[in-house]
Amino acid sequence: MSEPSRRQRNKADKRRRITDAATTLFKEVGFEATTTASIAEAAGIGTGTLYLYVDSKEDLLAEVFRYDARHAWDEAFERIDPDAPLLDQVLSAYLHVTWHHEADPRLARCYFKELLFVSERARSRVDEFIDGFFGRFGQVMEEAKRRHKLADDVAVEPLVRNLFAAWYVLMQGHHTRGTDLETTECRLRQSVATALHGLTPATASTPVGSAST
Amino acid sequence: MSEPSRRQRNKADKRRRITDAATTLFKEVGFEATTTASIAEAAGIGTGTLYLYVDSKEDLLAEVFRYDARHAWDEAFERIDPDAPLLDQVLSAYLHVTWHHEADPRLARCYFKELLFVSERARSRVDEFIDGFFGRFGQVMEEAKRRHKLADDVAVEPLVRNLFAAWYVLMQGHHTRGTDLETTECRLRQSVATALHGLTPATASTPVGSAST
Amino acid sequence: MSEPSRRQRNKADKRRRITDAATTLFKEVGFEATTTASIAEAAGIGTGTLYLYVDSKEDLLAEVFRYDARHAWDEAFERIDPDAPLLDQVLSAYLHVTWHHEADPRLARCYFKELLFVSERARSRVDEFIDGFFGRFGQVMEEAKRRHKLADDVAVEPLVRNLFAAWYVLMQGHHTRGTDLETTECRLRQSVATALHGLTPATASTPVGSAST
Amino acid sequence: MSEPSRRQRNKADKRRRITDAATTLFKEVGFEATTTASIAEAAGIGTGTLYLYVDSKEDLLAEVFRYDARHAWDEAFERIDPDAPLLDQVLSAYLHVTWHHEADPRLARCYFKELLFVSERARSRVDEFIDGFFGRFGQVMEEAKRRHKLADDVAVEPLVRNLFAAWYVLMQGHHTRGTDLETTECRLRQSVATALHGLTPATASTPVGSAST
DNA sequence: TATGAATGAGCATTCATTCAT
DNA sequence: AATGAATGAATGCTCATTCAT
C-alpha cells in the first residue's frame, strides 16, 4: 500500500516542496509576478494549504532567502583562509556572497526591496539569521585578535556591523540603483580597507585604494 | 492687468503648493494612503495638472524628501563645532538628522521604503543630494586632516561612505524594524567610534558614548 | 465624423447603459454570480469607470430595484379603480406588485436578501423610494376617507405601514423561504381584510376569510 | 470508574458548551467575524467535532437565536397582565422583546440579516419557534375574545400575523437601518393601536401612545 | 496650460466544511 | 466519537496615470 506512505511523504516534504516551488518561481518570474496559487500548484497542494505553512507570500520570500543566504554564507565562511590577513578574509567572504547573488540579481533585488518590510514573524527569522551571521563574523574577528591581525582594543561588534553596513549599502546600490559590479567591488575593497585601517597592526596585504572609482 | 500677474504668481507657486500639499498629506495619512487626486485637490489644481509638474507620486516623495533632508542636513552641518574632535563632529551631525526624522517616523519609514525604488529621474535627484552630502562630509574630513584630527593617509571617500552606511543601516533598522531609539543611538556612537578608531591621531578625545549635540 | 458624437452619446447614456447591463445580468445569472467586470463589459466601459457612477455592486442593485419597483408600483397605482372599495384597491395594488416580482423571483430574492444591508447612500435612495410609495398609499387612504370607505378617525400612516409590513413579510416568506404563491396570496387577502376590518364602514366587498389557508 | 462518567458528562454538556461558546463569541466579535474554529476551541473540542453536533455555522446562529428568543418571549408572555386591555397586552409583549434585543443589538442585527437565509433544517427550527409563538399569541387573542376585549368575528391568525409583521418590519428598520429606538417604539404603539382599532369593542381603554410596560 | 473622465490590471487570502485516520 | 490537516472557490475595487478636449 504505497498510497498512505506517499501521503506521509507528501506531508513530511510539504514544507520543503513549498519552499522549493517558491524559490524556483521567484527566480523564474520574479517575486511580484509569482502568484501564491502558482506556488501551491507547483508544490502540489491546495491554495489554502499554503497558509498552513506560511503566514504570507512575503513570509515565503524570507524563507527562500534564509535557505539561499545560509548556503551562500556557509560557503563564504568555509572558504576563508584561516591564515590570511583579516582584510583578505573579510573581503573574500563578502565578495563570495556578492558573486553568489550575481547569479540571480532579480531575486537579490527582491530581497533588498521586500525583506525589510515583511511581517513580524518572518522578519524575526531573517533577523535571527543575520544575528547568526554577525556572530560568525565576530568569531573571525576574535580569531584575528588572537592571531594579532586585529588590535586588541577594537570593539568587535560595531566593527562587524560597520563592515556589514558598508557591504549592504553597496549591494543595495548595485541591485536597486544599477551601480555596476566593477564599481561596487572596487568600493567594497576601499570600504573594507578603510574600515580596518589602523586596526590591523601589520597593515593591509592589499594596498588601500589600489582600485579607483 | 492684475489678472495675468495673479495667474503668474499662481503658476509660480504651483510647484510649491504641490510639494506642500504632498508633504502635509504624506505626514498626515502616509505615503501609500495619499492619493494623487487628494494632493491635486489640496494644491488646488486638476488631477492631470499634477503630472505637468511631477513625473510620478514617488517623484513627489523624492521631492518632499529633498526639501526635508536638505533642511535637516543644513542645520546639522551648521551646528558642527569646527574645533571639536572629528568623532564629535560626525556624531553631532548624524544625531541631529536622526532626531529630525524622529519628528515624523511615518514619513521617515516611507523614505526608507520607497526612495530606493523611485523612477530614474527622481532617483538621480536624490543621488545628487546624497552626493552633495558626501561632498560636504568630505570637506569636514579634509578639514580634520588639516587640523590633525584625522590621519593624512586615510581615504576620505570610503570613510564617508562607511559612516553613512553605518548610520543608514541603523536608521533602516530603527524605522522599519522598530529598533528603539536608545539602542540605535548607542550603536551609532559605537559604530562611528569604531570607524574612526585608529584614524584619529590623538585618539578618543571624547570617551565613546558621551558625545553631545 | 461620427466618432466624437458616438463618444458623447456613450457618455450621455453611460448611467443608463450601466443600469441596463446590471439589470440584465442580475436577472440572467443572479446578483452574486454577476461580476462587476461583466457589468462594465456589458455596458461598454472600463471596470474602473463603473465606480465613477456607482459606489458598489450593492449600490447598483439598489439602482436596479428602484427602476424596477418604480415601474411596478406606478402600474399598480394606475390600475387602482378609484371607485372600488378600499380593500379591493389595496389588494389590487399589492397583488399587482406581487405578480410583477413573480416574473423574476431570483431578482426579487436578491432585493429581500441584499437591499436591507447596502451602503448608507444606496439605502437612502431605497428609503426615499419607499417613502414616496407610502405617500402615494396615504393619498389613497385619504381619498377613501373622503369617499367614506374609511373611518375618519383612522391614523393613515400606521395603517399604511401595517399593510406594507404584512405584505413585506409575506413576500419575504415567499421569496426566501419558499412559501408557495397560493398560500401567500391567500394570507395577503386575509391580512389586508383583517387590517381593514372595522375601519371600513360599509364592510368588505370581499368576505373576510373567504379564502382558506 | 470516574473516567467514563466524566466523559459522558462531557458529552452531555458538549452541545451546551458549543451553544454557549457560540453565543459568547457571536456577542463579542459578531457572527461573521466568529470562526467555527474559534467556537470549537472555546467549546474545548476539535474543529471537525463541531460538525457532529451542528449542520453549519448558520445553524448555530439559529440555535443561539432559539435559546435567546425563547427566553425573551417566555418572559414577555409571563408578564402579560391577563386583565389588561388587549392593546396593552400586545404592546407589553412586543416592547419587552424589543428591549431584550436592545441589550445586544449586534446579535439582533445578525438575526435579521442571516436568519432568513439559513439552511432548510435550521430554518424549520426557527419557523417552528415562530409557529409556537404565533400559537401563544393566538391564545391571548382567543382569551381576549372570551373577555370581550376582541370582537368575535375577527380572524385571529391574520391578526397575529399582522401584528408580528408590523413589529418585525420595525425591528428590521431599527436594527438594520438604524431607526432610533424612540421612533421605533412610537411607531410600534401606533401600529398596534391601528391594527386593533375597530376590533376592540370597548375601544381604546388606554389612549394610544401611553401604554406602559 | 489645464482639466478630469476614463482606464484596467491584478491577486492574496479566508474559513466553512470534509474526511481519512 | 473525535480529530485537525487539507481544501479551493471566488472577486470587488483602487488609483496612478493618460490624453482628448
Image: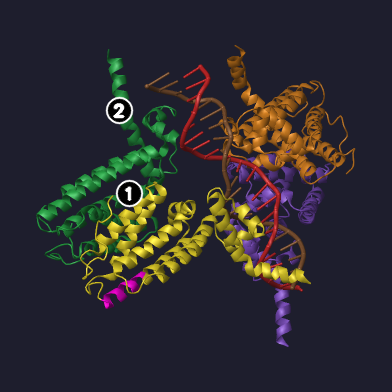
Chain colours: A orange, B purple, C yellow, D green, E red, F brown
Q: Percent from the top left, x then y, of residue D50?
A: 40, 30
Q: Secondary structure under badge 1?
A: loop
> Is residue D172 in the magenta section?
no
- Chain containing the residue with disc 2: D
Q: Main secondary structure of the magenta part?
A: helix
In the figure, residue B64 lies in which quadrant? bottom right
> B104 and D120: which one is in front?
D120
Q: Is residue B13 above or below residue A138?
A: below
Q: Residues within 10 Å of mark 2 (few under 14, many from 20)?
A: few
Q: Percent from the top left, x then y, of residue B180?
A: 57, 43
Q: Percent from the top left, x then y, of residue B105?
A: 60, 52
* Residue A62 visible somewhere in the drawing: no
Residue under the point 81% across and 34% down: A102
Q: Callout 2, which amino acid?
A: Asp
Q: Is residue A126 left or right of residue B150?
A: left
Quadrant including the C terminus of chain D? bottom left
Q: Secondary structure under badge 2?
A: helix
Q: Is residue A127 above or below residue D187?
A: above
Q: Is residue A69 above or below residue D207?
A: above
> D31 and B88: which one is in front?
D31
Q: Callout 1, which amino acid?
A: Asp
* Residue A140 visible somewhere in the drawing: yes
CA–CA distance in space, label 1 to label 2 = 25 Å
> A166 and C190: which one is in front?
C190
Residue under the point 28% across and 42% down: D129
Q: Is residue B171 above or below residue A105?
A: below
**Circle 2 sits on which residue?**
D13
Marked residue nearer the N-terminal end (1 or 2): 2
Magenta stretch in the rendered image: C137-147
Q: Which mark is residue D104?
A: 1
